[in-house]
Amino acid sequence: MTTDLLAALHAFPALSDAGQQAVRQAMRFSHHAAGTVLLHKGQNVSGAYFVSRGRLRVYAIGENGVEATLYVIDPGETCVFALNSLFNDLRYPAWVQAEADTVVGCVPGPLFRRLFEREPAIRDIAVRGLSTVVFRLMEEAESACTQRLEQRLASLLLTRANAAGAVRMTQQQMAQHLGTTREVVARLLRVFVRHGWIETGRGRSVVRDAEALAGGVDADPRRGGGLRSG
């Protein structure tokens, strides 16, 4: 796990030599296949979690059983909910799932608390992590309130597409991210395909015309809403 340790330590660029050594000795790594649920709502938190590689999805489950993504944790980032649980002696308030093949490093709670008191770099990590998550949550809340579902789906495809336009998410994963059902996502994707904006395949979609996809969903509900027919 040497490579994973070095990748995780990139989250601590200004940590003192003593702090770096303490983290090296205490950090423990775990590997999680895509789709694995790492934390459940109500679970106790053992430390501060940092993504070394891959991606984690933090999500809530509504009364109807539909999942909705709250935020994602990328390499070098930490889970703010876990920090809040750690410092306030609370149980974890959501669920965490590996979106891809993911390695997570955990700094034990007692050590992280000591480092937080002594190391400005640790306090900076916590503040930056909190700021990032607050921004992402505000973006998600604004999107949910002001955008229709087809706009949010188009935005998801555009932001998750790689250089070749491929989005490696299943329809179920898209639905979970957007807080809707797979059937609704499948219906909207068929509309996108019919317009020639994307192609779909097993477990992935490919954006063929990003400009048309971005502009093809009418953003002004006063003009009738829905997808443009042109």
Image (tube, grey):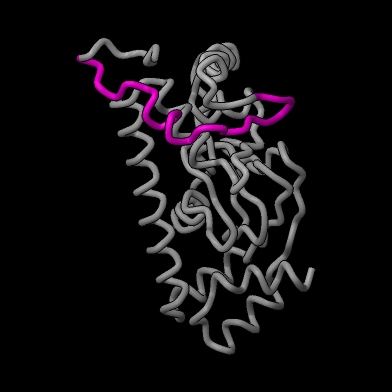
Spot the residue most to the right: 1
**Residue at figure coordinates x 75%, y 48% from the top left:** 32
Region of the chain picked out in magenta, as a range:
200-222
Residue 169 image point, x, y percent: 64, 33
Extreme residue toward the bottom, this view:
17
Q: From this view, report whether residue 211 is shown above or below residue 30.
A: above
Towards the viewer: 144 or 170: 170
Q: Residue at x 34, y 34 (%)?
A: 141
| Location of residue 201 by image quarter | top right
Query: Which image quadrant is residue 42 in?
Result: top right
Q: Is residue 130 visible in this depiction of the protein?
A: yes
Position of 48 compared to 88: left or right?
Answer: right
**Residue 72 placed where, x, y %?**
52, 45
User: Which residue is more in the foreground, 90 or 225?
Assistant: 225
- Which residue of the protein is positioned furthest toward the front in this rendering? 230
Quarter occupied by the C terminus? top left
Q: Quadrant of residue 193?
A: top right
Q: Is residue 204 left or right of residue 144?
A: right
121 vs 91, nearest the viewer: 121
Residue 147 position (above or below residue 70):
above
Name the residue: 79% across, 68% down. Answer: 1
Residue 51 coordinates in the image, percent (x, y): 62, 58
Q: In the image, what residue occupies the spot 53% across and 31% down?
A: 177
Is residue 47 in view from this perspective? no
Does the magenta-highlighted stretch encompass residue 209?
Answer: yes
Q: Is residue 227 magenta?
A: no
The image shows residue 216 at horizontal and vertical percentages of: 39, 24
